[in-house]
Amino acid sequence: MNILTLLLQAGAASKPQGGSQLGFWLVIILVFVVMWLFLIRPQRKQQKELEKFRAALKRGDKVVTVGGIYGTVDEIKDGDKSILIKVDGDVKLRVDKNSLVRDYSDTAQK
């Protein structure tokens, strides 16, 4: 037999069974903590920033939609969830406020 297999079997035979329950729960808790730190927390932060961006929109802001359409905010109604954006010349599109993903005016100035 393999030496590693013999060592693992000898180690498993000498361990008490009560400790494996505690180790199992510690591993499960550790997995949830790591998932929270690396997945859930950054996603919540990004979602809050996006909501803050959408709430602070004003006329003249340059925005990008989820579909990749670049435009300038032309009209915002308080009670309505849609925004009128000017795309090119006299072309205007009414889009849902939730479809706006970022402001590209900062990158356009660079």
Image (cartoon, helix red, strand yellow):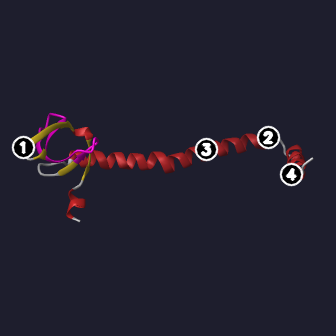
Left or right side of 34 for 49:
left
Between the C-alphas of marks 2 and 4, the distance is: 24 Å
Image location of residue 15, percent across then percent down: 85, 46
Residue tagged by mark 1?
Answer: 90
**Disc number for residue 29:** 3
- For the residue carrying disc 1, how many other residues have a C-alpha within 10 Å: few (<14), some (14-19), or many (20+)? few
Image location of residue 79, percent across then percent down: 14, 34
Q: Are marks 2 and 4 in contact (CB under 8 Å)?
A: no
Q: Which residues are magenta?
A: 64-86
Query: Which badge, 2 or 4, comes first in the chain's sequence?
Result: 4
Residue tagged by mark 2?
Answer: 18
Q: Amino acid at mark 3?
A: Ile
Q: Are marks 1 and 4 in contact (CB under 8 Å)?
A: no
Q: Amino acid at mark 4?
A: Leu
Mark 1 or 3, which is nearer the eye? 1
Residue tagged by mark 4?
Answer: 4
- The residue at the point 20 percent across, 63 percent down is 109
Left or right side of 31 for 52:
left
Left or right side of 38 for 56:
left
- The residue at the point 61 percent across, 47 percent down is 30
